[in-house]
Image (cartoon, rainbow, N blue to C red):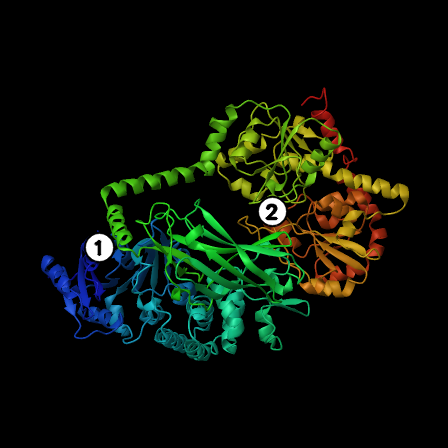
Amino acid sequence: MPVPDVSVIVIVYNDADRLPTAVQSALDQTHKSVEVLIVDDCSKDRSYEVAQELQAANPGRVRAFQLPQNSGGCGAPRNHGISEALGTYVIFLDSDDVLEKNACRNMVAAAERTGADLVSGMCVRVHVDNRHGKTVDWYPWIYATSRTLESITEMPDLLVFDTLSTNKCYRRDFLLEQGLSFPVGIHYEDLLFSAQAYVAARRIALIPNHVYSWNVVENSAAKSISNRRHEIANFVHRMEIHRRVDELLEEKGYDDLKFRKDVKFLKHDLVLHLRDLPLLDDAYRHEFAELANSYLATISPQAYAEVQPIQAICAYLLGKEDWTNLLPAADALISAGKLSAPLVEKNGRIYWCAEHLDDPEGARILDVTEAGYHTRPLSKLSLGNRLTSYSDDGHGKVRLGGSVVNPLGRVKPGAKLSGTLEFRARRTSLQSFRFPLTSLTHAGRTLDWTGEADIARKLRPLGIIDVVWDVRLDMDIDGETVSTRVSAGAIDVNSGHALHIRPRLTRLVSDRIEPSISKKGNLSYVLTSSGAASVRTQGLIEEALQSRAAGVAKKGLRRARRVKKDLNSGHTKTRVYHEVLSKLPIRKGLVVFESHMGKQFSDSPKAIYDEMRRQNVDFEAVWSYEGAKPTGFPKDATLVRRWSYPYLRALAQAEFWIDNQGFPPALTKRPGTTYIQTWHGSALKRMGFDLPQMKVLSRPERERHQRGLDRFDHFLVRSEHDVRTLARGFRLREDRLLRTGYPRNDELVKAREKETESGARERGPLAAALKIDPAKKVLLYAPTFRATPQGSVRRFELPFDVEAFADRFGDDYTLLIRSHYLNQVVLPPSVRGRVIDVSQGYDISPLLVLADGLITDYSSLMFDYTLLDRPMIFFTYDYEEYAGETRGTYFDLREKAPGPVVATEAALFAAVDEFKSADTEYARARELFAAEFGEYDKGTAAQQIVAKFFTPGSGK
């Protein structure tokens, strides 16, 4: 018999039904020189008999072996396979998985081409019991392209993340020479074997091809070994394997690999077990902590800074065995973003708990200020809500009690409270039922509630398609709606009775409903069958669902869902806009307004809208908004969600479009519609076709971009600088330019004129609304956003110590911070009253009028603020990168800036110290700056626009 190129080692234990499929995937390889070795781990079912049958059916290609006794893991059968293999290469396959048909061909070709000892390809997780056919690629970034490594140190992510042994092809001589084998008698053997192979390999090849399908059955009654995380022996094995891998890395001096593995342990391995802690008993928890903490002591403290805050918090509290604070944190791991602890404020910072803050490391890890829990509205927080009591009468009435986190005591004792329990069918678009709470009381760190639900009398499910019902608590707190899921916590709801129920589709479908716990630990109810008739009906239904007719019906349902999804796709909406809505007649007087792509009611579109209302213009106003719910928009206008069908219809029929950034470029403007583009700022940074990245676009991409710009019928400019920069960058014709200035700046011009005439500065109602001390000056810090070289928006972080700023200047100044609308800022409580976030809910012009001085960087607000003739500081800490490497500028800001240009925090603070002298020193520079960049801002821009387009006799 010729020596095969590949030996595929298939291990099996009690899996007779799926074994033939796995073996067939190896026999069906497009690379034909393949032998299959089936190693049965002394199964109790027919697995070995099936293996022998496959051997008989495929003589010379399949060989069957059986271990004398069960080894209890994957290591022994794989090792036996290695010893019996004849092939040049070895591949491992589990009996419940399959090889992709080109797996052997692609991996052998890569091994021959590169001389690699080990070739690894992409694995895909196939969720077998998912009705949508869900598949997930296993760490796809590792396999984005073909790559050959001379050492695992070239790509640590491979060792840290892809610890599978089954998506790989090994040179058999390499395994034998290095004495590589799987550990026996211990689980998680893949982690150690893969680490040993990676470290020993003289060359590793990665290929971007799918090679292995890992079949995952999430709802299996019998969990795989690695998923039995509630068994303490499982965790013992995991810890032992990690220690062995660490010893290997330490022996090789791979400190960086060890550090990255530490980070993954905190992010992944430990988290898998922590999630189960709230549901396990004290004995398990203490044994678990003892095992985990001995290993956590070997992890670098720096690793904690590399993981998500809640992951670091859990690991730290586990080390302290602080179960009171750890269990809520573990609960938060299950549901991302859940706030399950009441928090504490100390020394101007927000912490997960009050304990351990005397430990500097503990204070650092437990600090959750940056999460913004203290600034976000309660309705935007996912508050922890755990059951404290549960009982039922055995028939249909349930009594529940629970406790909702009151973060930082934000709900005050005198708050007006009410609430309901909502039972909602998990399937979307189905019914829900509400039961008023019997009590909802303030209990300091929590809000405690009780409720009674007469399920048998009121809850009326359909009976087949609404099998699962989730429970939610909806509270009204001083008029603000706060909604939370009800988690089981330590309450054993499974001890509850199966309650009587009356489905609308008759009790022959189901006659009971039972409490259950979801994967995230939340309370739910599941319809079941108890009576003989309903059990018999359920059997008939299950049988019918497997029939050919049911298959046809399911296909039809899936097709209908795809149609519904397609109806809401951007492609379909664009087609409907052009082929249907654009055939409707233009509606005279219909004006669609939009500011910053629907994010705000603000800027020049707002100024024009307000002027039209002031002059009693007869028009139909439509404002677009982005997001689930509009806030801050006018009540005397029609509001439409951006990209909704009402939005598309309004744009298709509008006589005027008015916005400051750009309506969706895929939508063609009709000839009967006039597009007034106000834009949102003069340009320091390069724009449009002047951007470097525009030059590398393909011709069709540039043409598509130009078509979007060509829709502008009129483009507002405030200076000839705008003509030379924005108009040129957008390739706009001269006849489309309106030299009116910006309507949003009318307020600034008028404020300066009034101040000059009266000799006094009026702060107006905004200062009172913000509770600003009249004795203090107001500084506004308003930076622009930063982008990566790829064009995505970088996360915003304050480039100076805001607490140090408040401590140094808080007696004399109130600092307002206005982040760019693409960013958000979180201020620590320590600066409360001295520093105020005004990023949301405020138009920029009143803020500029209020500010006695502006601190900015490259924001176009510099051009607007100069109209007020007030001092400015330019904090350009990254000027070289911003101006040179990122996108370039039209002029050197350092040469023309009408105020000091500083690059460090110390220089910024010094400039604030010298603010008064800077006012005088840069007076002439501000005058020149205003003349050059705001020559057409005369305070009448909105009036000019209304007079030109919206008064009787006006023309377009």
- Asked which secondary structure carries label 2, the reply is loop
Please give the name of the residue rendered at 82% of the width and 50% of the height, measured from the top-left corner.
922
User: What residue is shown with label 2?
Assistant: 887
Mark 1: few, some, or many residues within 10 Å (few <14, many ≥20)?
some
- 568 or 79: nearer the eye? 568
Q: Quadrant of the C terminus?
A: top right
- 331 or 318: nearer the eye? 331
Residue 133 location (% of width, % of height): 33, 49
Q: Quadrant of the N terminus?
A: bottom left
Up-down relation of residue 709 to residue 311 (above or below): above
Q: Amino acid at mark 1?
A: Ser
Please give the name of the residue rendered at 27% of the width and 43% of the height, measured from the top-left corner.
550
Name the front one of labels 1 and 2: 1
Residue 931 location (% of width, % of height): 79, 39
- Disc 1/disc 2 C-alpha distance (Å): 52 Å
Q: Is residue 548 left or right of residue 736?
A: left
Q: Is residue 354 left or right of residue 524?
A: right
Q: Are marks 1 and 2 in contact (CB under 8 Å)?
A: no
Mark 2: few, some, or many residues within 10 Å (few <14, many ≥20)?
some
Reading the chain from its start, which is encountered first: label 1 or label 2? 1
Residue 790 location (% of width, % of height): 53, 49
The image quadrant of residue 91 is bottom left
Residue 70 in view, yes or no: yes
User: What residue is shown with label 1?
Assistant: 25
Residue 896 in view, yes or no: no
Q: Is residue 740 left or right of residue 129?
A: right
- 593 or 446: nearer the eye? 446
- Asked which secondary structure carries label 1, the reply is helix
